[in-house]
Image: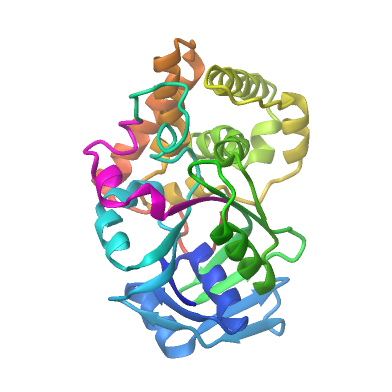
């Protein structure tokens, strides 16, 4: 199988390295310093933070890819998808699939299966309709990944051995399919435990409820989840976000349960690991707030759920995001960051 990793950042490099080591025909699409490092030295994977516990993977990296590929694994962040949709589609074979690994709710959330809101779509994720027109849903497989990866420097990633990894994949129409089973087998055999689901939207919501709280609050407060959980005032804010997120999920038929106290206890003492949105702020990069927060607020507007806390969070992130896009100045160290997916 010819495989392209579309967006060879930390997670993309991790997946490309796994599949390359498993003997697959893999190309990583990269640019700038990342492309130079991968082309010159391959991918260096460090474990346990020890220089002597590392693996060098000779990965094929290119800045321009022409295809066709049977599998394109898209690890771009959601705000970059609209501009890339036509290119991704053009790189696929007629029977090829795009495995979409992004945080938050996807642009296709209200399409491709029986919808609780017929005729509606999430405009904050596909404002021009380009995604819906340029990337046919029959070529898309939804995915949710759980794996912390640190981009130490270009071409070099760190994998915490203590952190488990998993991938959940599902068809947009909620059906079983041979290609889904084949893809799950491929990824599992490469070393990433992968399961299939007939409700990929529910899987998206389960991961979203983590990001809705910690990505947004860590970015706004410039603090880790453990420091937020240590604040009594912030704990109340966390509980409000969880309650509103669950209410929106239930309003579109998602049966979720999440205990706020357990969620807070789970991150107690986590003073170091930085969610991806906090990393982006410190690196001066635009934020993935549309898929993680604004899509939930937009759904709430469709279903009539009151979300005053989430509206306030969205407003703060909007100001922060516009500042980052305008200034493009790093606020803190960029380069030794954990991309927690």
Query: Is 339 on the left-hand or right-hand side of 282?
Result: right
Residue at image point 58% right, 59% down: 178
Verify whether residue 126 appears in magenta: yes
At 65% from the left and 73% from the top, the residue drawn is: 190
Q: Is residue 319 above or below residue 77?
A: above
How far across and down, in percent of the image, does residue 18 sit?
Answer: 60, 75
Task: State which quadrant residue 158 falls in.
Answer: bottom right
Specify the segment rendered in magenta. Answer: 122-144
Does residue 336 appear left or right of residue 331 in this picture?
Answer: right
As drawn, 80 above or below 160: above
Determine whether 291 is above or below 279 in the image. Answer: above
Residue positioned 57% across, 42% down in the render: 200
Q: Name the one closer to the observer, 124 or 331.
A: 124
Expressed as whole percent of the image width and height from the top left, the position of residue 232 reads 70, 22
Check if residue 154 falls in the magenta segment. Answer: no
Residue 310, percent across and down?
A: 48, 21
Q: How many marks?
A: 0
Q: Relative to residue 301, is residue 70 depicted above or below?
A: below
Comparing 152 with 127, the one in front is: 127
Who is closer to the viewer here, 146 or 255? Answer: 255
């Amino acid at each position: 199988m010819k495989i392209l990793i579309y967006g060879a950042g930390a997670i993309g490099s991790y997946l490309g390295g796994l599949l390359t080591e498993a003997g697959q025909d893999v190309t990583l699409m990269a640019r700038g310093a990342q492309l130079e490092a991968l082309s010159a030295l391959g991918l260096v994977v460090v474990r346990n933070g020890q220089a002597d516990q590392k693996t060098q993977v000779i990965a094929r990296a290119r800045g321009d890819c022409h295809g066709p590929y049977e599998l394109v694994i898209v690890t771009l962040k959601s705000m970059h998808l609209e501009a890339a949709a036509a290119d991704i589609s053009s790189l696929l074979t007629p029977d090829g699939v795009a495995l979409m690994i992004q945080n938050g709710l996807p642009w296709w959330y209200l399409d491709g299966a029986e919808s609780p809101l017929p005729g509606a779509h999430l405009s904050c994720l596909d404002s021009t309709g380009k995604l819906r027109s340029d990337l046919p849903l029959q070529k898309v497989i939804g995915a949710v990944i759980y794996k912390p990866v640190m981009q130490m420097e270009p071409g070099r990633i760190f994998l915490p051995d203590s952190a488990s990894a998993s991938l959940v994949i599902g068809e947009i129409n909620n059906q079983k399919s041979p290609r889904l089973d084949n893809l799950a087998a491929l990824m599992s055999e490469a070393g990433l435990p992968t399961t299939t689901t007939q409700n990929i939207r529910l899987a998206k919501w389960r991961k979203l409820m983590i990001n809705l709280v910690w990505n947004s609050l860590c970015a706004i407060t410039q603090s880790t989840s453990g420091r937020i959980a240590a604040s009594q005032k912030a704990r109340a804010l966390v509980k409000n976000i969880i309650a509103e997120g669950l209410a929106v999920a239930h309003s579109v038929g998602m049966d979720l349960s999440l205990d706020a106290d357990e969620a807070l206890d789970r991150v107690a003492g986590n003073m170091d690991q930085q969610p991806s949105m906090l990393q982006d702020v410190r690196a001066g990069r635009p934020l993935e707030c549309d898929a993680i927060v604004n899509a939930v607020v937009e759904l709430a507007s469709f279903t009539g759920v009151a979300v005053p806390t989430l509206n306030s969070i969205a407003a703060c992130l909007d100001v922060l995001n516009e500042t980052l896009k305008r200034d493009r100045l790093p606020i803190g160290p960029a380069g030794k960051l954990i991309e927690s997916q």
